[in-house]
Image (cartoon, grey):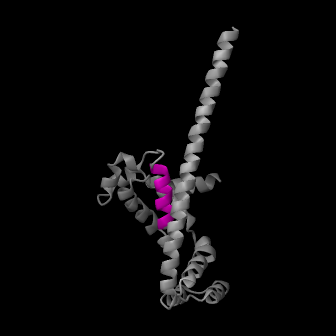
Amino acid sequence: MTKLLAWVQARMPTRERMARNRLIAPLAARPELWRLTRRTVPRGVAVGLFVGIFLMIPGLQVIGAALLCVPFRANIPIAAVSTFVAIPPTIVFMILPGAAAIGNRFGYHADLAAVTAMIERGASGAQWLAWISSDAAPSLALGLTVMAMVAAVLGYAVAARVWRWRVMARRRHRLHDALARALHKSAA
Protein backbone atom coordinates (compact mmCIF):
# COMPACT_ATOMS: atom_id res chain seq x y z
CA MET A 1 0.00 0.00 0.00
CA THR A 2 2.85 2.42 0.74
CA LYS A 3 4.34 1.78 -2.70
CA LEU A 4 1.02 2.66 -4.30
CA LEU A 5 0.76 5.85 -2.25
CA ALA A 6 4.34 6.80 -3.15
CA TRP A 7 3.62 6.15 -6.83
CA VAL A 8 0.46 8.29 -6.73
CA GLN A 9 2.22 11.06 -4.82
CA ALA A 10 5.09 11.12 -7.32
CA ARG A 11 2.62 11.67 -10.17
CA MET A 12 0.37 14.10 -8.33
CA PRO A 13 0.51 17.63 -9.72
CA THR A 14 1.72 20.07 -7.08
CA ARG A 15 1.42 23.83 -7.03
CA GLU A 16 5.19 24.16 -7.33
CA ARG A 17 5.44 21.88 -10.39
CA MET A 18 2.58 23.66 -12.08
CA ALA A 19 3.99 27.11 -11.27
CA ARG A 20 7.16 26.19 -13.21
CA ASN A 21 5.15 25.40 -16.36
CA ARG A 22 4.25 28.62 -18.13
CA LEU A 23 1.15 27.12 -19.79
CA ILE A 24 -0.52 25.98 -16.60
CA ALA A 25 1.03 28.40 -14.10
CA PRO A 26 -2.29 30.26 -13.70
CA LEU A 27 -3.72 27.12 -12.06
CA ALA A 28 -1.06 27.28 -9.37
CA ALA A 29 -1.96 30.87 -8.60
CA ARG A 30 -5.51 29.94 -7.58
CA PRO A 31 -5.40 28.66 -3.98
CA GLU A 32 -9.04 27.51 -3.96
CA LEU A 33 -8.06 24.76 -6.41
CA TRP A 34 -5.69 23.26 -3.81
CA ARG A 35 -7.66 23.59 -0.55
CA LEU A 36 -9.44 20.64 1.01
CA THR A 37 -12.91 21.95 1.78
CA ARG A 38 -16.40 20.49 1.91
CA ARG A 39 -17.08 21.94 -1.53
CA THR A 40 -13.82 21.40 -3.41
CA VAL A 41 -13.25 17.75 -2.43
CA PRO A 42 -16.57 16.35 -3.75
CA ARG A 43 -16.21 18.49 -6.87
CA GLY A 44 -12.69 17.12 -7.37
CA VAL A 45 -13.94 13.55 -7.05
CA ALA A 46 -16.73 14.21 -9.55
CA VAL A 47 -14.41 15.89 -12.07
CA GLY A 48 -11.79 13.15 -11.72
CA LEU A 49 -14.27 10.32 -12.18
CA PHE A 50 -15.91 12.00 -15.16
CA VAL A 51 -12.62 12.68 -16.94
CA GLY A 52 -11.12 9.32 -15.93
CA ILE A 53 -13.99 7.36 -17.45
CA PHE A 54 -14.78 9.55 -20.43
CA LEU A 55 -11.21 10.36 -21.51
CA MET A 56 -9.49 6.99 -21.53
CA ILE A 57 -6.07 8.23 -22.61
CA PRO A 58 -3.54 7.80 -19.78
CA GLY A 59 -1.60 10.97 -19.11
CA LEU A 60 -4.23 13.21 -20.64
CA GLN A 61 -6.65 12.26 -17.90
CA VAL A 62 -4.75 14.11 -15.17
CA ILE A 63 -4.21 17.15 -17.39
CA GLY A 64 -7.85 17.15 -18.47
CA ALA A 65 -9.04 16.84 -14.88
CA ALA A 66 -6.78 19.69 -13.75
CA LEU A 67 -8.07 21.94 -16.51
CA LEU A 68 -11.70 21.03 -15.82
CA CYS A 69 -11.20 21.84 -12.14
CA VAL A 70 -10.89 25.55 -12.99
CA PRO A 71 -14.48 26.27 -14.06
CA PHE A 72 -15.90 23.95 -11.39
CA ARG A 73 -13.57 25.26 -8.64
CA ALA A 74 -12.65 21.71 -7.70
CA ASN A 75 -9.62 20.36 -5.87
CA ILE A 76 -6.93 19.49 -8.42
CA PRO A 77 -5.06 16.78 -6.44
CA ILE A 78 -8.30 14.97 -5.58
CA ALA A 79 -9.42 15.13 -9.22
CA ALA A 80 -6.05 13.82 -10.39
CA VAL A 81 -6.20 10.84 -8.04
CA SER A 82 -9.82 10.14 -8.98
CA THR A 83 -8.85 9.71 -12.64
CA PHE A 84 -6.93 6.56 -11.68
CA VAL A 85 -10.23 4.68 -11.56
CA ALA A 86 -9.66 4.15 -15.28
CA ILE A 87 -6.57 1.97 -15.33
CA PRO A 88 -6.05 -0.57 -18.14
CA PRO A 89 -7.71 -3.53 -16.36
CA THR A 90 -10.83 -1.53 -15.49
CA ILE A 91 -10.96 -0.03 -18.98
CA VAL A 92 -10.77 -3.39 -20.72
CA PHE A 93 -12.89 -5.49 -18.37
CA MET A 94 -15.42 -2.99 -17.01
CA ILE A 95 -15.61 0.40 -18.71
CA LEU A 96 -15.57 -0.58 -22.41
CA PRO A 97 -18.01 -3.51 -22.05
CA GLY A 98 -20.25 -1.43 -19.77
CA ALA A 99 -20.23 1.52 -22.16
CA ALA A 100 -21.03 -0.76 -25.10
CA ALA A 101 -23.91 -2.37 -23.20
CA ILE A 102 -25.34 1.03 -22.26
CA GLY A 103 -24.99 2.31 -25.84
CA ASN A 104 -26.67 -0.83 -27.17
CA ARG A 105 -29.68 -0.17 -24.91
CA PHE A 106 -30.17 3.12 -26.76
CA GLY A 107 -30.38 1.41 -30.15
CA TYR A 108 -26.76 1.52 -31.28
CA HIS A 109 -24.72 -1.60 -32.00
CA ALA A 110 -21.44 -2.54 -30.40
CA ASP A 111 -20.74 -6.26 -30.48
CA LEU A 112 -19.84 -7.34 -26.93
CA ALA A 113 -18.82 -10.80 -28.13
CA ALA A 114 -16.19 -9.15 -30.32
CA VAL A 115 -14.85 -7.30 -27.28
CA THR A 116 -14.58 -10.53 -25.31
CA ALA A 117 -12.86 -12.29 -28.22
CA MET A 118 -10.42 -9.41 -28.65
CA ILE A 119 -9.57 -9.45 -24.95
CA GLU A 120 -9.02 -13.22 -24.99
CA ARG A 121 -6.74 -13.20 -28.02
CA GLY A 122 -4.85 -10.07 -26.92
CA ALA A 123 -5.84 -7.83 -29.80
CA SER A 124 -3.40 -5.19 -30.99
CA GLY A 125 -3.98 -1.47 -30.75
CA ALA A 126 -4.80 -1.34 -34.47
CA GLN A 127 -7.49 -4.00 -34.06
CA TRP A 128 -9.01 -2.05 -31.14
CA LEU A 129 -9.00 1.14 -33.23
CA ALA A 130 -10.69 -0.67 -36.13
CA TRP A 131 -13.38 -1.97 -33.77
CA ILE A 132 -13.95 1.44 -32.21
CA SER A 133 -14.18 3.15 -35.60
CA SER A 134 -16.91 0.75 -36.71
CA ASP A 135 -20.55 0.88 -35.60
CA ALA A 136 -19.28 0.67 -32.04
CA ALA A 137 -18.22 4.35 -31.90
CA PRO A 138 -21.66 5.92 -31.29
CA SER A 139 -22.53 3.20 -28.81
CA LEU A 140 -19.28 3.72 -26.90
CA ALA A 141 -19.53 7.50 -26.97
CA LEU A 142 -23.04 7.46 -25.54
CA GLY A 143 -22.21 4.70 -23.06
CA LEU A 144 -19.06 6.46 -21.84
CA THR A 145 -20.95 9.72 -21.44
CA VAL A 146 -23.69 8.07 -19.38
CA MET A 147 -21.20 6.09 -17.27
CA ALA A 148 -19.03 9.15 -16.66
CA MET A 149 -21.99 11.30 -15.62
CA VAL A 150 -23.42 8.66 -13.29
CA ALA A 151 -19.99 8.01 -11.74
CA ALA A 152 -19.46 11.76 -11.25
CA VAL A 153 -22.82 12.22 -9.53
CA LEU A 154 -22.34 9.16 -7.30
CA GLY A 155 -18.73 10.14 -6.55
CA TYR A 156 -19.83 13.64 -5.56
CA ALA A 157 -22.54 12.27 -3.27
CA VAL A 158 -20.25 9.73 -1.61
CA ALA A 159 -17.42 12.22 -1.13
CA ALA A 160 -19.78 14.81 0.35
CA ARG A 161 -21.21 12.18 2.71
CA VAL A 162 -17.77 10.97 3.78
CA TRP A 163 -16.66 14.58 4.33
CA ARG A 164 -19.70 15.25 6.52
CA TRP A 165 -19.15 12.00 8.44
CA ARG A 166 -15.53 12.97 9.14
CA VAL A 167 -16.51 16.44 10.34
CA MET A 168 -19.19 15.03 12.62
CA ALA A 169 -16.80 12.41 14.02
CA ARG A 170 -14.26 15.12 14.81
CA ARG A 171 -16.92 17.23 16.51
CA ARG A 172 -18.07 14.27 18.62
CA HIS A 173 -14.46 13.54 19.56
CA ARG A 174 -13.84 17.17 20.60
CA LEU A 175 -17.09 17.24 22.57
CA HIS A 176 -16.18 13.98 24.29
CA ASP A 177 -12.72 15.32 25.19
CA ALA A 178 -14.16 18.59 26.51
CA LEU A 179 -16.71 16.71 28.58
CA ALA A 180 -14.04 14.40 29.99
CA ARG A 181 -11.87 17.41 30.93
CA ALA A 182 -14.84 19.13 32.58
CA LEU A 183 -15.68 16.00 34.57
CA HIS A 184 -12.04 15.60 35.55
CA LYS A 185 -11.90 19.25 36.80
CA SER A 186 -15.14 18.90 38.77
CA ALA A 187 -13.94 15.67 40.39
CA ALA A 188 -10.66 17.29 41.47
Furthest residue toward right: 187
Name the foreground residue: 84 vs 113. 113
Residue 12: image location, x then y, percent: 48, 55
Residue 68: image location, x then y, percent: 39, 61
Residue 148: image location, x then y, percent: 51, 69
Q: Along the horizontal axis of the image, is 109 left or right of 13?
A: right
Q: Is residue 143 above or below residue 160?
A: below
Name the foreground residue: 71 vs 79. 71
Residue at 61% over, 27% down: 175
Q: Is residue 117 above or below residue 18?
A: below
Does the segment drawn in magenta span residue 37?
no
Picture quadrant where residue 151 is located: bottom right
Name the foreground residue: 110 vs 76. 110
Q: Which secondary structure dominates the residues rendered in magenta?
A: helix
Q: Which residues are the magenta region?
A: 40-51
Residue at 60% over, 28% down: 174
Residue 119: image location, x then y, percent: 64, 83
Q: Is residue 83 visible?
A: no
Quadrant where the C terminus sits is top right
Residue at 33% over, 52% down: 19
